[in-house]
């Protein structure tokens, strides 16, 4: 039952699909990029030679880096290839949220502008000091940007164990052994070489190489030693014993046994599900769990092998009473008119008005910042967890909200979607509550807490072991 429940909710798409809950009023989503102050433009490498790594960059992260209660945005950028030069050099960029859907570039003063060829990112408090750190997976050495808590970051490099320049992809934080410290999982893509060129055509048009033109790579797992450092346990844990072209990943307890497992979406290959055996080792059971292939037994992937650089609309689907989805792209407003080649997506409440806004990173173009301007009389609840016995971010914990005969559940993740991170603060739409609203938290370390008679339209901070919720803002 647990396996069917979790994987019925996994959806992999090429372009971005946004699903919104049903309500009486029309949904309204407005593109506010131009007035947001965000002038970022993505750079893929643009060598003109269609190298594989250029087609798969990049994700983004939404997180509160300065603990001011506003969600900030971190965009990833690639870098020039084969000794090419770009002036000024492309860099990852951090935009601080000023409120009112306005942002300012704080990349230089924060020290967060890494110059690597970035693909994936996640945010999380790996050292349990109360602020959010950044982990970036690159084509090349991966990077930790340690948050000092004063608005600045320190850069640390994960030194490679061999001479290869590995292609990073999705990255996630998880507590594999429930010691209260977040461990680190990097998905790796393929053993890339500039010498390999694809020779296939689609409808007579030459295309870039795909993952099947290269050997798949193995993934990496690092144990958090609790002293600010990590140790590579990829081989001894079993994670590094099986290769696949890893892309998007998500860590969660798929079988309900109170430890964290990892799903890896492989590009044009069988997907992996690494089951946590409870002793810091993992077993790959994707085929047994029914998630390695689709219903026809065919391989699928988070990225297609034969795709040229093209633009197409993104789609917004409305959830109709939990039974079906209706395409409302043409009716939501200016956000439904964009035609881009989209990669990473993040969904968070950027203006603290109770509903979820959207940021989309587009390949070789400006991002799209979308403000949710829907007007109705429905109510919301936003919840942020702080672990005491569990890791401080409460990654792996599950929040259930019961109201009006409905039950909604969300887990806390670090790293999700397409090589991105978002949603540390959980958002629930509660409609028109007619009876008691109850919150249950299943903490990652196993403790369960219940909070009854909770009011709506609140931003709550729930701390492990404390019986009374705090107001987050």
Image: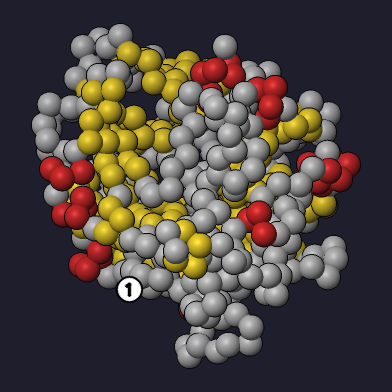
Q: Which quarter of the image is occupied by the N terminus?
A: top right
Vertical position of residue 434 compared to residue 60: above or below: above
Is 91 or 308 nearer to us in this picture? 308
Quarter of the image with the C terminus is top left
153 and 368: which one is in front? 368
**Residue at which label 1 appears:** 39
User: Residue drawn at (79%, 68%), measured in percent from left and top?
Assistant: 164
- On the image, the x and y values in percent for residue 461 come to 44, 35
Q: Is residue 331 visible?
A: yes
Q: Residue at x 36, y 35 (%)?
A: 427
Q: Position of residue 277 (x, y in %)?
A: 79, 26
Residue 178 visible from this viewpoint: no
Element carrying mark 1: loop
**In x, y percent, where is residue 360?**
36, 56
* Picture coordinates of residue 224, whole percent (x, y): 76, 47
Pick the residue in front: 460 or 116.
116
The relative height of residue 297 versus residue 227 in the rendered view (above or below) is above
Residue at far front of view = 204
Question: Residue at the right extreme?
Answer: 236
Left or right, 380 with reference to 143 = left
């Amino acid at each position: 039952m647990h396996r069917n429940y979790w994987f019925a909710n996994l959806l992999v798409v090429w372009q971005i699909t946004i699903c919104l809950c049903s309500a009486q009023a029309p949904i309204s989503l407005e593109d506010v990029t131009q007035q947001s102050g965000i002038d970022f433009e993505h750079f893929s490498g643009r060598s003109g030679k269609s190298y594989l790594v250029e087609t798969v960059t990049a994700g983004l992260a939404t997180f509160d880096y300065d603990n001011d209660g506003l969600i900030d945005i971190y965009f990833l950028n690639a870098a020039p290839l084969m000794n090419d030069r770009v002036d000024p050099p492309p860099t990852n960029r951090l935009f601080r949220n000023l409120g009112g859907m306005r942002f300012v570039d704080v990349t230089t003063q924060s020290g967060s502008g890494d110059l690597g060829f970035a693909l994936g990112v996640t945010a999380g408090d790996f050292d349990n000091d109360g602020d959010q750190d950044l982990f970036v997976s690159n084509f090349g050495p991966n990077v930790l940007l340690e948050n000092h808590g004063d608005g600045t970051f320190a850069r640390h490099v994960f030194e490679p164990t061999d001479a290869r320049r590995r292609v990073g992809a999705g990255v996630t934080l998880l507590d594999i052994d429930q010691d209260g410290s977040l461990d680190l999982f990097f998905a790796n893509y393929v053993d890339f070489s500039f010498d390999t060129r694809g020779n296939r055509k689609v409808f007579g048009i030459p295309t870039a190489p795909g993952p099947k033109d290269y050997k798949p790579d193995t993934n990496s797992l690092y144990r958090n030693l609790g002293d600010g450092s990590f140790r590579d346990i990829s081989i001894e844990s079993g994670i590094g014993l099986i290769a696949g072209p890893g892309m998007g990943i998500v860590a969660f307890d798929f079988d309900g046994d109170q430890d964290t497992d990892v799903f890896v979406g492989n590009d044009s290959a069988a997907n992996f599900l690494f089951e946590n055996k409870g002793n810091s080792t993992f077993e790959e059971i994707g085929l047994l769990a029914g998630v390695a292939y689709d219903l026809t037994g065919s391989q699928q992937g988070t990225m297609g092998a034969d795709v040229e650089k093209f633009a197409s609309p993104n789609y917004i689907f409305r959830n109709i009473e939990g039974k079906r989805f209706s395409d409302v792209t043409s009716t939501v407003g200016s956000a439904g008119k964009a035609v881009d080649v989209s990669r990473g997506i993040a969904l968070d409440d950027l203006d603290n008005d109770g509903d979820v806004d959207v940021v989309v990173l587009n390949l070789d173009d400006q991002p799209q910042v979308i403000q949710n301007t829907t007007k109705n009389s429905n109510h919301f609840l936003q919840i942020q967890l702080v672990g005491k016995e569990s890791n401080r971010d409460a990654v792996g914990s599950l929040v259930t909200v019961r109201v009006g005969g409905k039950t909604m559940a969300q887990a806390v993740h670090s790293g999700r979607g397409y090589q991105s991170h978002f949603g540390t603060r959980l958002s629930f739409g509660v409609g028109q509550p007619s009876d008691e609203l109850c919150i249950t938290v299943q903490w990652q370390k196993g403790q369960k807490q219940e909070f009854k008679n909770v009011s709506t339209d609140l931003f709550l901070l729930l701390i492990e072991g404390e019986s009374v919720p705090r107001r987050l803002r």
